[in-house]
Image (spheres, rainbow, N blue to C red):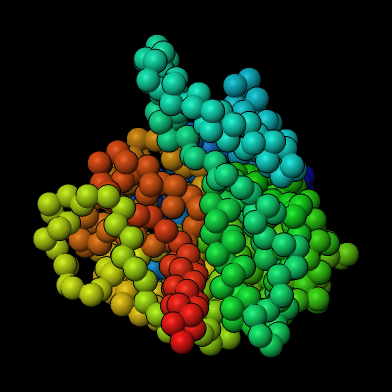
Amino acid sequence: MAKEAHLKNLDYSVVQQCMHCGLCLPTCPTYDATKLERHSPRGRIALMRAIADARLDVTKAFADEMYFCLGCLACQTACPAGVNYAELFEHARAEVEERRVLSSPKRNLIRGFAVSWLFMDLRRLQLVGQAMRLYQQLGLQTLLRRSGILKLLPKRLRELEAITPTIQPQFTAEMVAPITPAVGVRKYRVAMLIGCAQDLIFSDVNRDTVEVLAQNGCEVVTPPEQSCCGSLHAHNGEWTLAQQLARRSIDQFPPEQFDAIITNAGGCGSHLRHYAKLLADDPAYRERAALWDAKVKDIHEWLVEIQFRVPNSGLRVQDPGTPTKELETRNSKPGTFPVTYHESCHLSHGQKVVTQPRRVLEAIPNLRLVELPEATWCCGSAGIYNLTQPEMAGKLLDRKIQHIKATGALTVATANPGCLLQLVNGAAQHGLKLRVVHPVTLLAEAYRQASHSTQNETREL
């Protein structure tokens, strides 16, 4: 078989496992929005099986359907037959890219620049990030927005400019040492993955993660130059590039040298745990990839596993601004800090890490966790889905923001950079004064507050 026949080359039991029972339908955001069978997991699997059976060719219509799917994996959680939709989904997109049915000069240029060049070397990504940071810090972005020039651009370009992320003043390597010693007795030696967009936009989350790990007896190894994990590539049909990046990661972080390999990004973590499947046909990496998968841990999962230290001091309420009247009147219990939690799709459905982030949040003194309606419903970020499918992503974001407003919380926690950025933009669009934060940041702040209180008490003595 030619290498491009991804679906035909799959273990056929994976392709035919779907019973077409329909229990996935209520969990699928695109089916919920359209009520069209082809926009459901069941409908998409039927198309994939038809291609595997050579009853259907890979066409532009099939390709469009595969890219209309969010890949949120809610259907995988709901499926009673245990269908591995993630595997089917990635191979279907890989088939689309191998057959080049969506090929066009514009698309090829964008994918070639972003997927095949920019995200294959994070030094290039950091150079772009540094240029964006300078553009923002010099006030050029503000000047351009106030000038009115943007009104001359096409609507889609104006929308993209409006959601341009703010680049952090420092990247992870500027804040975190290559080796951070454990506070007190060293119990574990762990590796810290800094991510791609995470390093540019949420490097402070990486710093907080390293601090929390050190506070819990971990020596943390954080090399300044790392590679992309390959999730962007695998989720967008670039199977060969994803394999290259998986090998790089294994070589940089030999799994046998660490007690755990830590990720704090839900989307990346879901991919990172499947290197063994990705490299199953590579005899040089097959066994190391299996060990890698066993060592990869989401930060919340690892903290609960090692029985993390509960902070002995609570958080000070950080008011993100003057709240709306609606928020003022809801859940306003004195002495508590209400926080709601949005579940990253790939953290909950892909990694099955559901209770652990809540355990972390609930352990923080005076923090009161307010459950979010439809907490596991996708926010519309879904990797680059909000860029490629802005209309559907916008509907999902509006739905999510309305649920967040209903909780009355002024802070929402979520554990994926795409979700963090999506909710930041959603709050801005709705004029909502909302702090969007990673759960580990709140834990780090509680540890710092406890340390600060101890220092003050010592001075008083």
Of residues 342 and 216, which is closer to you in this image?
Answer: 216
Q: How many marks?
A: 0
Residue 324 higher or lower than 186, as above or below: above
Q: Quadrant of residue 305?
A: bottom right
Q: Nearer the viewer, residue 209 or 282?
A: 209
> Residue 374 location, x and y as percent?
28, 62
Is residue 389 shown above or below 10? Answer: above
Residue at the image point whose x is 75% and y is 62% from the top: 178
Question: Can residue 353 be seen?
Answer: no
Q: Residue 147 falls in which quadrant of the image? A: top left
Image coordinates for residue 460, horizontal then vertical, percent: 44, 82
Residue at the image position 80 percent from the left and 77 percent from the top: 256
Give the residue displayed 58% in from the left and 53% down from the top: 203
Looking at the picture, how far across and down is residue 74, in whole percent?
A: 41, 61
Query: Measured along the vertical axis of the image, is residue 46 above or below residue 275?
Result: above
- Name the residue at the right extreme: 284
Is residue 285 toward the left or the right of residue 410 in the image? Answer: right
Residue closer to the observer: 31 or 453? 453
Q: Residue at x 44, y 52 (%)?
A: 420
From the viewer's perspective, is 308 left or right of 25? right
Q: Foreground: 137 or 357?
A: 137
Residue 170 seen: yes
Q: Give the percent coordinates (x, y) of residue 313.
A: 40, 80
